[in-house]
Amino acid sequence: MSEVRSTCPYCGVGCGVILTPDGEGLSVRGDPDHPANRGRLCSKGSALAETVGAEGRLLAPRIGGHETDWDTALDRVADRFAATIAEHGPDSVAFYASGQMLTEDYYVANKFMKGFVGTANIDTNSRLCMASTVAGHKRAFGTDTVPGTYEDLDQADLVVLVGSNLAWCHPVLHQRVLAAKAARGTKIIVVDPRRTATCDGADLHLPLHIGSDVALFNALLREIAETGAFDPGYVDRVDGLEAALAAARTDSLEPTGLAPDLVDRFFRLWIGTDKVVTVFSQGVNQSSSGTDKVNAILNCHLATGRIGKPGQGPLSVTGQPNAMGGREVGGLSNTLACHLDIEVPAHRAAVAEFWDAPRLASAPGLKAVEMFRAVASGRIKALWIMHTNPAATLPEADAVRAAIAACDFTVVSDITADTDTARLADVLLPAAAWAEKDGTVTNSDRTISRQRAALAGPGRARPDWWHVAQVARRMGHKAAFDYDGPAEIFREHAALSGIAGGFGRDFDISALADLSDGAYADLAPTRWPVAAKRGGRFFADGRSFHADGRMRMVPVTWRAPAAKHEPRFPFRLNTGRVRDHWHTMTRTGRSARLSAHLAEPFVEIHPCDAARLGIAADTLVDLSAPTGRAILRATVTDAVQPGTLFAPMHWTGETAPSGRIDALVAGATDPVSGQPESKASVCAARPFAAAWYGFAVSAAPMAPSCDYWAVARSATGWRAELAGRDAPQDWEAAARTLFDLPAAEAQVLSDPARGIARLAFREEGRLAAALFVGPGPLGLMRDYLATLPEIDPLTGRAPADRPDPGPILCSCFGVGVNTILTAIETDGLLSVEAVGVALSAGTNCGSCRPEIAALLAPAQGREAAE
Ligand SMILES: Nc1nc2c(c(=O)[nH]1)N[C@H]1C(S)=C(S)[C@@H](COP(=O)(O)OP(=O)(O)OC[C@H]3O[C@@H](n4cnc5c(=O)[nH]c(N)nc54)[C@H](O)[C@@H]3O)O[C@H]1N2
Ligand SMILES: Nc1nc2c(c(=O)[nH]1)N[C@H]1C(S)=C(S)[C@@H](COP(=O)(O)OP(=O)(O)OC[C@H]3O[C@@H](n4cnc5c(=O)[nH]c(N)nc54)[C@H](O)[C@@H]3O)O[C@H]1N2
Ligand code: SF4
Ligand SMILES: [Mo]
């Protein structure tokens, strides 16, 4: 098979990839012709080839844990949904979808629920992600329209990143911004309570208090007014300026906690630069005032007329590969389809007629958090979860897990056999994965790209749209779901968008409604609208999609996060992402090199708090919140502010059961968007009383059962961090259980008085596993030990001619921190480029360049001082 052009399945940058199947798997490189990335890929995109294959996959439908055939499974789903609807009405069933579904899958699921089941109880993980942006856009523009494009980032003179760790979460866009900095001196400002890798390339970092963005942007609006920086021609077309300004005048900068000189520099740069793009992401959206934060930002752009013009405008970066496509098809419970409104009778009538839908939902349905509360209370009796892992990623995750387990009937469509959610399903439906299926996705700047199949799916896996269409057909809706493939679904969606365009909506791709199968197969990246009634860009002319065509500024005032501090829970808990993992790690966790960057869940805690609580670096911390507990490794760092903690969202019951961070996140939501406040819960921290710490390496999967464990892939098998409150009586017996090696030859060195043990197990002379135990955090050469079976298990030390590389920083070339530090010292390297020349580190995808820059800082400081 020859090369296949497709799109990366991870973040909303939507990079083009070229896949070359090699008979078993495939190789992946960046597509030089794709407008989003022009050939570049980040560490995750570069490692995609390591995440395909049958390992861990769900290969056949299962009912009650037993494999079955498709007909039996689909009949069961259709029968149970039909019976529940007949007995309890359409609102007793629900669908929980995902911004990672392809547009075609999403369109069919939305049509099924809203048009044919007759309930709007279909919501998606985009509620946890983009809902506040959707709501903010609608308030300002009348539709959910993203005004900006990626070219604006190339052309801007100032890029402000608000609540966005672009360097780790949208790395290829971050590189575009850094390229603009190199080419035209673009200034970069980061607004984030935490010092992140993104700050390394920035000119200014505003470490505001968590949740205080409205206060900051209201202050900017006041300054715009005081300095006369309004665009008089533009504000003529904007309603609400006076009200927004009056609201801003009741606010102060105090909640931000920012030093006045920092704020002054921000104001001067923002007001003094015409070409400013304000990029925002989850630090804005995931907040109980998320919608107000969005409008506080939009207000400043509207007041200055800096919107819809080259190099100017607000740009919400989408998280998931098809977060934007989900918004187009109306995947949220309060939207209809093609940016039409469920509340507007004329829109409903048009959609009902187009679909020939017998009972179109007439009112918004439940939003994600409410939906799972309705599952808990028994109001929802049948639930279908597709392409998302809510038992791990919704707030109050332990309660969500219990609710799904107790639900009368749960269907899960997934590619992975064992996830926190899949384990709870009554019926499991195996999905075709990325590179095995066809469809489209829309990225952050409205560019529609094809995902194309290059591999046959393993086992009986089938695409998600097919799961839904088959169940719908079995429920009596044959004609409406008689699709023969994604091209036909796409044409229908495009035709419906033409009706939306007729209502004056922004999302109109009706020019694509007659694409032949061949033209769909060849579809090149295309930015919508395609069939716009008016040309040029959105909003440069000051015309909105509100009925009166006017823009709106919205009066907003600062509110504190919903969870209140109390003596029992003195910390504010911020959560988010790491560079090399994707959400619940069902894909990235299969790659050894992606797992090497950060192999364990952790919590960042300020040195003053750590000292006060007696928490030493690398010990374990016991976190508790009103909704749950967690045990995480302490990273003591002043990157976080005193009184705040940061923990990643990626670890689950499969990889580190005590690291399920959403167990601690409260279910507070934004009153307008319903988006949960994933970044500002409260919790307590204290040292975890570990009697022992362990590190294990094994060629085969392990089965740990201690109080704390975290497993990760390594190049030769698996590695695990372990700890417990009580030490086992017999380490050899415990290790044999852990490794499932009842009969292997064992070598044991132990010093019970000092709490130290080292155990190695051989099978047929070959080293199969090793365990290292000590009374405190283990200072081991972990990356050397993970090269099992090449290691010397009893000394645990790398031979002098093979120094321990340290934690892997550059995952493309496998270059560790120690290697880079040694080269900086011995070769006197002073720049990221010099490190690249010496070690290749940072020269492929570039995702690690900010971290290499951070390692260089001390040497650069010394050089400057000399
Ligand atoms: N490597 C990687 N990349 C990803 C993903 C992934 O899982 N891994 N997921 C993708 C998805 S779905 C999404 S939605 C995006 C998310 O992309 P981002 O939003 O960039 O990522 P997060 O780490 O969730 O949060 C960003 C920052 O918000 C800050 N923050 C917290 N509270 C506040 C606040 O009150 N105000 C401000 N201004 N900032 C605050 C946090 O400290 C954090 O650094 O990433 C996408 N890209
Ligand atoms: N504390 C905290 N919680 C958060 C966040 C946060 O910042 N902090 N961020 C939130 C955000 S922005 C998001 S987007 C969510 C993401 O959270 P989720 O969507 O719950 O996480 P994923 O791991 O992406 O789940 C995707 C699932 O789909 C499966 N899958 C992969 N490919 C396919 C396929 O082709 N078909 C099907 N049917 N299944 C497939 C995977 O195996 C996996 O089980 O998390 C949210 N939760
Ligand atoms: S930036 Fe990385 S994760 Fe995002 S689409 Fe591009 S290659 Fe994929
Ligand atoms: Mo997201």
Image (spheres, grey):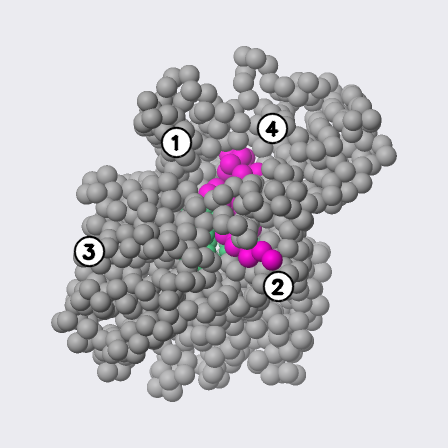
Which badge, 2 or 4, comes first in the chain's sequence?
Answer: 2
Which span of residues is magenta-colored?
A: 570-599
- Residue that carries the numbered disc 3 in the rendered image: 272
Q: Which amino acid does label 1 sit on?
A: Ala
Residue most toward the right?
Answer: 729
Q: Is residue 313 in sight in this rendering?
A: yes
Which badge, 1 or 4, comes first in the chain's sequence?
Answer: 4
Check residue 383 in the rendering and tell me which mark sits there, or answer none. Answer: none
Q: Which amino acid does label 4 sit on?
A: Arg
Residue contact between numbered discs 2 and 3, judged by CB atoms under 8 Å: no
Is 597 magenta? The answer is yes
Check residue 566 in the rendering and tell me which mark sits there, or answer none. Answer: 2
In the rendered view, tell whether residue 78 sits above or below residue 168. below
- How many angstroms separate mark 4 from mark 3 (CA)? 50 Å
Q: Is residue 438 in sight in this rendering?
A: no
Of circles 2 and 1, which is in front? 2
Q: Which of 374 and 755 is in front in this view?
A: 755
Which x, y percent locates residue 627? 65, 62
- Residue that carries the numbered disc 1 in the rendered image: 857
